[in-house]
Each structure stands twice: as C-alpha cells, then as structure tokens.
Amino acid sequence: MVGLFIESIGIIAGTLGVLAWIPQLKEVWIMEKHEGISLSTLHLISTALLLWLIYGLMIMSIAIIISNLAALACILSVIIGVIRLREVEKDSQ
C-alpha cells in the first residue's frame, strides 16, 4: 500500500513535469518561434532525464520510467522543431 502511494506521488509529479513542456511545444510547433530557446540547455536536460530513466529502470520504478520517457519525448520534439525552424530560417536568408 505504501509503495503504491509513493508511486502515485511520482506519477503526479511526472505528469506535472510533462505538462510544463506544453507551452514550449506550442511555441515551437504552432507559433513557429524558436528565439530564446537554448539547444545546449535542452541537450543537458535530455541527458539528465536519460540518466533518471536509467535509474528508474534499475530500481523498477514505473513512475520514474514513464515520466522520464514522456518528458524526453517532449524535449526531443522541441529540439527537432527548433532545428527545423532554424534551418528554414537559414535557407531563406
């Protein structure tokens, strides 16, 4: 019972962490804006999340695994969108 409660807290925290990426996704993919987005910061965050994912796999924590997979998917989507927008902008100059 205690383990389920702890995992529930992790799932809620992970969900909030993923929801926090929605404004960035909207900015890049819908508004098509990339100014002020640091790819090096996103790469560093991605590395940290990958390490958290490995940790989650090692301790078999479903909350850590799912939340980090979802957050990585969001960040990779932002990275791809920013690179795409910057290439289009570079080509049009």
Image (tube, rainbow, N blue to C red):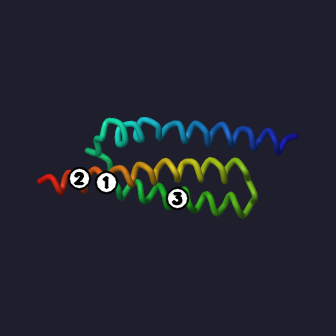
Badge 2 local density, few (<14 within 10 Å), some, or many (20+)?
few
Q: Quadrant of the C terminus?
A: bottom left
Q: CA distance from mark 1 to mark 2?
A: 6 Å
Where's residue 80, x and y in %?
38, 54
Q: Secondary structure at mark 1?
A: helix
Q: Would you say the residues marked 1 and 2 are in contact, meaning their CB atoms lie under 8 Å apart?
A: yes
Circle 3 is placed at which residue position? 48
Distance CA(mark 3)–CA(mark 2): 29 Å
Q: Earlier in the sequence, mark 1 or mark 3?
A: 3
- Residue displayed at 58% across by 62% down: 51
* Residue displayed at 79% across by 38% down: 5
Judge by depth and name the residue closer to the eye, 92 or 42.
Answer: 92
User: How crowded is the residue under tag 3: few (<14 C-alpha within 10 Å), some, or many (20+)?
Assistant: some
Q: Which mark is residue 84?
A: 1
Residue under label 2, please give it: 88
Relative to 14, 41 lies left or right = left
Give coordinates of residue 23: x percent, y percent. 42, 35
Secondary structure category for the residue under label 2: helix
- The one of 85 and 34 positioned closer to us in this rendering: 85
Q: Position of residue 58 (x, y in %)?
A: 72, 64
